[in-house]
Image (spheres, rainbow, N blue to C red):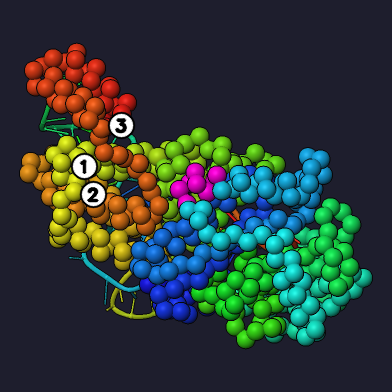
Amino acid sequence: MKIFNTLSNQLETFKPIYKNTVNMYVCGPTVYNFIQIGNARPVIFFDVVRRYFEYLNYTVNFVSNFTDVDDKIITKAIEDETTEIEIANKFIEAFYEDVERVGSSTKYLAPRVTEYMSSIIAYIEKLVEKDYAYAIEGDVYFRVSKIEEYGILSGRKLDELNVGSRIEINKKKENPLDFTLWKKTDVGVTFPSPWGEGRPGWHTECIAMIQDIFDGPIDIHGGGADLMFPHHENEIAQNRALHPHYIANYWMHNGHLNIDNKKMSKSEGRYILVKDLDYDYMGFRLFTLSTHYRAPINYTDEVLEANVQEWDKIKRAYTQAFYKLDLAEYLDEEVHEYEHLESIKDRFMYAMDQDFNTPNAITEIQNLVKYTNQKIRQKDALDPLLSALNLFDTFFEILGLKPNVKRMTKETRSIYMEWADARKNKDFDKADRLREALTERGVLS
RNA sequence: GGUCCCGUAGCCAAGUGGCUAAGGCAAUGGACUGCAACUCCGUGAUCACCGGUUCGAAUCCGGUCGGGACCUCCA
């Protein structure tokens, strides 16, 4: 199992801290709006990471937070004349709906900033105690100059950073690079602290949660490529101030999703919410996995449609094999090994082992589709067909693709028999009617 | 201004030093079929350009052109 580690900038063989266990944390959303399709990329990809490790018999402890204290939430609350909690609750619920839509699991630990306020404050206090942070007029800042290796993750050097290129320089800071740990404010919801009423900065929550939940360094820390700098860089800096380790052994970052080759932009109209996506969500999932996770992926309607179509093709092969076996009452027979299927499986797993090369894994699904379609039309091929179906199940489980096929009811089965009879008797009017009925029931397509 | 990534057939996309450059979509020829759909078989590339290193490069180095990202809170 090889993973590209952003920290070392190279492929590394994965070695867990605890045997057969993967402790991983993925930076979650700030819940002030519905998520857009770019936000779905880490939601899908890290779900696949988890599924693959589980397939390899690891126990995966998956944690992903909700940032429910933030300027944007406050702005939104004021706009909607409601409270921050209401906003957060509303969009957390919406987030879970979207996660399910794209086929990812919602069963993981999802801590909220408001639940970890005391841990966050305690963490900041320790930083101040050790002189890695300083309080001034109710604000607390992290002293970046005290961390020699600042920039280790993003590969930047301090003097290369063009400070103030995007935001105004804050004169209260000793160094413009110092980042906010605690912010004094009287707008929106505030929390008491040793430095007065205010709210935490964004960069402490993840490490405070990780420290609390895992009590030490974890295996994998993931998120979007944009989080590399400054967010994850700042996490490492804070953690290094108090601990000798880097919080996580492996840092994984997914590339961005662009629309028509440009960064998503609400103001320019290039912006699609997950809930508004008017396509099959499994096709969308296939689309996001059709490019390697570290590369940028470009969204166009044309490409998504091609993936939706591809998913239909995969599903059709699976469904037809399933019903053929169901009709023959062969679904519960013992599964045997076939050389061709074994080699497809080996190549699939090899692809997954190479830093989650899902495009190549999908190629093996396509090989399996071809094999299955050949066997469907072959006589006396029920046994290899059953093995193929079984392999589909394995692949679907790992990639989180779901064809949603159920065994025929007695009624459906008798319609099927009638249809076959009608065809044999060349009663094509009747056959066409029955074909339609079977199509409606998803048996034919 | 600084840092970095990318450029493979009409489209998507693997491959990152060595057999004839995977796979899918679209297109096209054929087979199958009551019709249609589905499916299967076949057909396509000197890897942006120029130069270099090497016995050998899409893969390494330099340059040119083109696209994109990041530089304090956007996954």
- Residue A383 included in the magenta stretch of the image: no
Circle 3: residue type: Gly
CB atoms of marks 2 and 1 within 8 Å: yes
Q: Position of residue A154 (x, y in %)?
A: 61, 72
Which residue is label 2 attached to? A389
- Chain of the residue under label 2: A
Locate residue A388 relative to residue A225 in the image: left or right: left
Helix, strand or loop at label 2? It is helix
Quadrant of the drawing holding the N terminus of chain A? bottom left
Helix, strand or loop at label 3? It is loop
Q: Determine if marks 2 and 1 fall on one subunit.
A: yes
Disc on the earlier residue, 2 or 1: 1
Q: Determine if marks 1 and 3 fall on one subunit.
A: yes
Circle 1: residue type: Ala
- Residue A102 included in the magenta stretch of the image: yes
Q: Main secondary structure of the magenta part?
A: helix
What segment carries the magenta color?
A: A97-104
Sort mark 2 into few (<14), some (14-19) or many (20+) by Cα contacts within 10 Å.
Answer: many
Q: Outermost residue toward the front?
A: A410
Q: Answer above or below: position of A165 versus A136.
A: above
Quarter residue A64 falls in:
bottom right
